[in-house]
Image: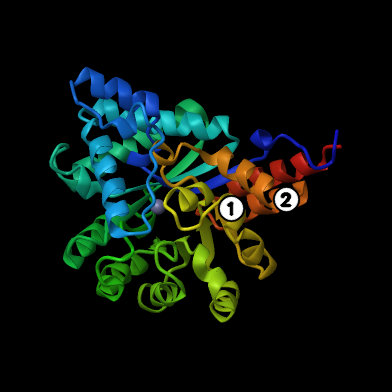
Amino acid sequence: MDSDSRPLRELPKAHLHLHFTGSMRHATLLELAERDGIRLPDQLVSEWPPQLSAADEKGWFRFQRLYDVARSVLRTEGDVRRLVLEAAEDDVADGGGWLEIQVDPSGYAARFGGITAFTDLVLDAVRSASEQTGLAMAVVIAANRTRHPLDARTLARLAGQYAGRGVVGFGLSNDERRGSTSDFAGAFRIAERAGLRLVPHGGELRGPEHIATCLDALHAQRLGHGVRSAEDPALLDRIVSAGVALEVCPVSNVALGVYSDLSSVPLPTLLEAGATVALGADDPLLFGSRLLGQYAAMRAAHDLADDQLAELARMSVRASSAPDDVRTRLLAGIDQWLARP
Ligand SMILES: [Zn+2]
């Protein structure tokens, strides 16, 4: 066998950037929409996966509108359980051994009896899915930066109550260009005191100056995306020495128009600087590519050798909140993968 063609599907990986709604299988979206007589926009049916480009705010608005449609098909407890189980099955099929699924409970509160009831449901679904598939999993609660910072505080308190009981992190999502990041510092202090890992989105739709704000005001320990730190060597140095990991989602970056193509995603710059990078799928439902797709895309676009791909997988494990037994098992599996002839 060529020494740089080991099957990526069999490389153990940790998945740190996957949104709850965006993890839905396309076939499941179609089936649930049909069940409930929901008419889907052509972009989610005949034109799927949609052409998005969020380079302008109109583009992001289109992305958000499709997201809202996808959210609207999840109507029953069974739908939530099915989504989580299928996300777990898909990660297992892609070689995933640990998944942190990110959810904003406020988007589902009205339909499922409030943010606490919904969080309980998601956590229970995660436990069942984990038992059924063997995938170790945890939840990241994410606040929405287009909502009021007081809502984020409420979510941070909620997340803190579940620290050590299935919730491992606290994030901040939605359009990076909206809202003022430092207004969310209070919420992040609450999450920090609860011992949660702080994982806001930053450095995708905005550049280095916003990443610095995420570090200074939110004390980010891992950045959702953070890929645009490649534009500022001094900032990148700071990220490397602080041990802040980057959840890089290449297919998402290109779909949203952040980079024109996969070979323009500056992964080599990040790796050469010594950054910790964990590849993630973000929203497979809208971008048409899951966990394995990210590794395959970067191997093809940047001619990555198998030892580099193994190191990417190791970094995803090191940057995760996985318990020690899972980390040890996955790291050993990665070594075994690389030791094959
Ligand atoms: Zn994201």
Please, is residue 175 above or below residue 167 in the view?
below
Please, is residue 73 above or below residue 13 in the view?
above
Q: Tag 2, which secondary structure?
A: loop
Left or right: 273, with 124 as reference point: right
User: Which residue does the numbered mark 2 point to in the structure image?
Assistant: 304
Residues packed near mark 2 inside 10 Å, few (<14), some (14 to 19) or many (20 plus): some
The image shows residue 291 at horizontal and vertical percentages of 54, 40
Amino acid found under the numbered disc labelled 1: Ser
The residue located at (55%, 77%) in the rendering is 232
Q: Nearer the viewer, mark 1 or mark 2?
A: 2
Q: Quadrant of the C terminus?
A: top right
User: Which residue does the numbered mark 1 point to in the structure image?
Assistant: 316
The image shows residue 43 at horizontal and vertical percentages of 33, 34
Residue 307 in view, yes or no: yes
Q: CA distance from mark 1 to mark 2?
A: 16 Å
Q: Quadrant of the N terminus?
A: top right
